[in-house]
């Protein structure tokens, strides 16, 4: 039953992707359909047109298996030997540094939100 629920939720998410692709095609937009689908799903969840429970397990499954989606791209890199040379070293360094920067920024923002949350809780408890 759980597998069936995940499949249905993935179909719902895929439906949003198809709608986003159709909007891109119909309106001749330069924005990828997947980005439009992401916004459509976000606004549907925000305005409670769909419930989080309707897509939560499917999205969790897709996120957990995300690495599988990158394997074809990684195998494709092998066809380009120049990427594996000096350029590849620079590319790996840039990816590593940008990952560190993103992690640091995310951690800092999370700590700021946590401090703000604690201040709000302390203010409420003192009232």
Image (cartoon, rainbow, N blue to C red):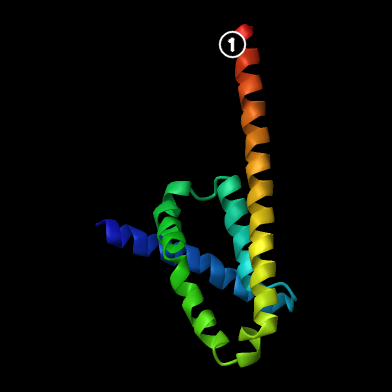
Residue at x 67% of width, y 27% of height = 116
Q: x and y percent of residue 3 in the render?
A: 29, 61
Left or right relative to 24: residue 41: left
Residue 68 versus residue 84 in the image, above or below: above
Q: Which residue is mark 1?
A: 125
- The count of marks equals 1
Quadrant of the image occupied by residue 112: top right
Q: Circle 1: is it few (<14), some (14-19), or many (20+) Cα within 10 Å?
A: few
Task: Give the camera-side residue of 122 and 56.
Answer: 122
Residue 126 versus residue 68 in the image, above or below: above
Quadrant of the image occupied by residue 99: bottom right
Most extreme residue toward the top is 127
Task: Give the camera-side residue of 121 and 31.
Answer: 121
Left or right relative to 96: residue 52: left
Residue at x 47% of width, y 78% of height = 71
Residue at x 44% of width, y 63% of height = 62
Left or right relative to 37: residue 66: left
Q: x and y percent of residue 29 in the render?
A: 74, 75
Q: Looking at the figure, which quarter contains the N terminus?
A: bottom left
């Amino acid at each position: 039953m759980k597998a069936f629920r995940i499949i249905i939720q993935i179909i719902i998410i895929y439906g949003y992707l198809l709608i986003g692709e159709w909007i891109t095609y119909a309106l001749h937009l330069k924005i990828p359909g997947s980005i439009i689908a992401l916004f459509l799903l976000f606004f549907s969840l925000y305005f409670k047109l769909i419930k989080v429970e309707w897509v939560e397990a499917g999205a969790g499954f897709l996120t957990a298996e995300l690495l599988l989606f990158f394997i074809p791209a990684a195998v494709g890199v092998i066809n380009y030997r120049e990427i594996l040379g000096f350029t590849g070293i620079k590319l790996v360094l840039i990816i590593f540094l940008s990952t560190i920067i993103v992690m640091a920024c995310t951690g800092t923002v999370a700590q700021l939100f946590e401090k703000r949350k604690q201040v709000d809780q302390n203010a409420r408890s003192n009232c």
